[in-house]
Image: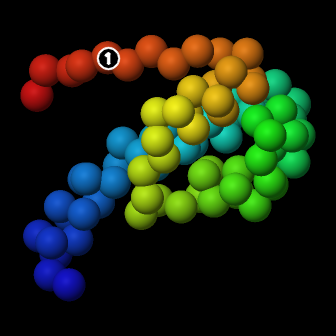
Amino acid sequence: MSMPTLKKKYDRLAPIWDLRKKMIALRIERGLTQEQIAKKMGTKKSNISRLEANGDSFPTYKTLEKYAAALGYRIRIEFELL
């Protein structure tokens, strides 16, 4: 892969990596393990592990909403001028 192609891919995935870092930080801040949040969401720990680690896929809004609610948060989406 050429450098410009890698840069484009990195730039495209950067927001989702930032989101995942935020999700993990909030979970840890709440003192919850992946297993505990999975139980609150009614899913498996392996799904939470993939959700927090897989940078090539984008979680659905519904999944993010469930994750946030399990932590006691709600989601707010903002638009930013380019």
Residue 37 visible at all: no
Residue at point 48% right, 46% down? 59
Inspect this view and state whether residue 5 appears. Answer: yes
Q: Nearer the viewer, residue 47 or 1?
A: 47
**Residue 24, x across and y down, in percent:** 67, 40
Horizontal side of residue 14 vs 70, given as left or right: left
Q: Please tell me which residue is depicted at 81% across the width and 25% down the height of the picture.
A: 30
Amino acid at the residue labelled 1: Glu
**Left or right position of 59 against 44:** left
Residue 36: image location, x then y, percent = 89, 40
Q: Is 36 situated left or right of 4 in this image?
A: right
Q: Is residue 73 above or below residue 10?
A: above
> In the picture, residue 74 is in which quadrant?
top right
Dot 1 corresponds to which residue? Answer: 78
Task: Name the quadrant of the N terminus.
Answer: bottom left
Determine whether the residue tagged by mark 1 lies in a helix, strand or loop.
loop
25, above or below 78, in the image:
below
How far from the left and from the top, in percent, is residue 46?
A: 75, 61
Write down the quadrant of residue 63 in the picture: top right
Look at the image and name its color scheme: rainbow
- Residue situated furthest bottom in the rendering: 1
Tell me the quarter of the image containing the C terminus: top left
Location of residue 13 with respect to 9 vertically, above or below: above
Q: Quadrant of residue 64?
A: top right
Percent coordinates x, y for residue 10 in the rendering = 29, 60
10 shown above or below 65? below
Camera-side residue of 38 and 17: 38
Q: Residue shown at 11%/70% (left/top)?
A: 4
